[in-house]
Image: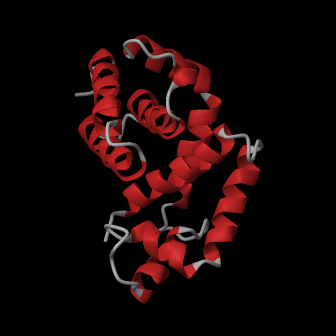
Amino acid sequence: MISGRRAAREAALVILFAIDAGRLTDVNEALAVFRDHLRGDDEVLDLLFAEDADAPFDEKRVGRARRFLDPVDPDGHWTFVDRLVHGVIDNRRAIDDLIGKSSLNWKVPRMNRVDRNILRLTAYELAFEAEVPGRAALNEAIELAKRYGTEDSGKFVNGILDRIAQELDRL
């Protein structure tokens, strides 16, 4: 079973991807649509917390995911999802500048949409979430890239984020 923080990052990534793709433009609407849609989909809820896509269905994981999505549950992680998504959107220009300076031969708009949003999410954490350990943010980003990106995404994301972390003295 994955941690609540990792599930929060995955949820934030999906929401940021949808916003980036132009599917939803209002951040609060995107958060609400994602949260409310997921509450009714046991299969997706189970996958959100499964270590891998081949894990057998588990009702306990579904219950844990429902608590995670509850915005008033003090043990839930939805507030972290909300903070990540708003943080990336509110600081996107600064984040994209940081990514652009740290990427070699790649302009941010030309990057694969999954990789770009993993980079934005983690660059936000490195630059604006001081309580998140830099190494943890980097490791989570690499895992997200391996799970959702291409065969080369892990290396690509790692290279750029490592330069950002060094520049921000977050290693």
Which residue is found at the position 26% from the left and 19% from the top? 166
- Residue 87, position in %: x, y? 57, 36
Is residue 91 found left or right of 53 in the rendered image? Answer: right
Query: Compared with residue 168, is residue 115 higher up or lower down, i.e. above or below?
Result: below
The answer to which of 69 and 106 lies nearer the viewer is 106
Residue that appears at 68% across and 69% down: 37
Residue 27 vertical placement versus 71 (above, below) = above
Residue 63, x across and y down, in percent: 48, 83
Examine the image and state in which quarter residue 53 appears: bottom left
In terms of depth relative to the viewer, which is nearer, 165 or 112? 112
In the rendered image, the quadrant that contains the N terminus is bottom left
Residue 122 placement (x, y as % from top left): 41, 36
The number of discs equals 0
Tell me which residue sits at (65%, 38%) in the image.
Answer: 20
Is residue 81 placed above or below 169 in the rendered structure?
Answer: below
Which residue, as the protein is rendered here, is positioned at the far bottom?
59
Choose top left, top right, bottom left or bottom right for residue 89: top right
The C terminus: image quadrant: top left
The answer to whether 143 appears left or right of 110 in the picture is left
Compared across the picture, whether 45 is left or right of 5 comes to right
- Toward the front, the furthest residue is 151
Residue shown at the point (31%, 15%) measured from the top left: 167
Depicted 91 relative to depicted 26: above or below? above
**In the image, residue 46 lies at what x, y percent?**
46, 76
In the picture, measured across the screen, residue 93 lies left or right of residue 67, that is right
